[in-house]
Image: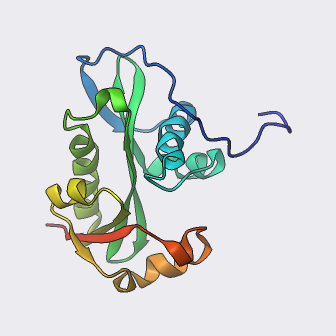
Amino acid sequence: MSPLTPIYNPPISLPKLHARPDAELIVRRAHVRDVPRLYEIINYYAARGDMLPKTMDQLYNRVRSLNVAVADGEVVGCAGLNITWADMAEVVSVAVHPDFQGKGLGRHLVEPLIDEAQELGIPTLFALTLQVGFFSHMGFHEIPKIHLPHKIWQDCKTCFKQELCDEIAMIREVG
């Protein structure tokens, strides 16, 4: 990245994928080389107001906590797990390229995160989302945000949406 390259320059539209819509989908841990595509997918939805934006810096720093879905060698979706405290973790950055929506890919990205939380001994998952239907189908239910004090103190206090947050807090017990 040159010194003049902006850290956050969200895409207006996603680049056309070369992956076939019927290609075999593989869910795996994200690699550093996946970050540019993650940036495109996540910030495409952020520009539409569907989720919070992520900078390249944030994605590189969190790459180890992200899973990706790959079709024909191209990243077509992502989801991550951020541990917020001993008993709680957040499902973050769930995004699927529009060409691959409606195929259950979001579920395939989130289910391994639920398993990982269980393996780590984390009994509770939460999400702050605008996609209430998706998370409801994944076994989450709505709660007041005030029940997530660690999230509020770690991230929400510096979020640009803090005073006008429209995200819904949802929680799920693991196990």
Q: Image quadrant for the C terminus?
A: bottom left
Q: Is residue 152 left or right of residue 173?
A: right
Q: Is residue 25 left or right of residue 46?
A: left
Q: How is the image coloured?
A: rainbow
Left or right for 117, reference 79: left
Quadrant for residue 11, please give it: top right
Name the spot of residue 106 as percent of width and height, x first: 27, 43
Res 20 quadrant in image? top left
Classify 47 as above or below 72: below
The percent coordinates of residue 32 (x first, y second) are: 55, 36
Q: Residue at x 38, y 30 (%)?
A: 76
Q: Residue at x 51, y 49 (%)?
A: 46
User: Would residue 122 be seen by someone viewing this image from the given angle?
Assistant: no
Instruction: Give the residue drawn at x 26%, y 60%.
Output: 132
Q: Nearer the viewer, residue 105 or 85?
A: 105
Q: Position of residue 24 (x, y in %)?
A: 24, 20
Looking at the image, which residue is at 61% across and 67% down?
160
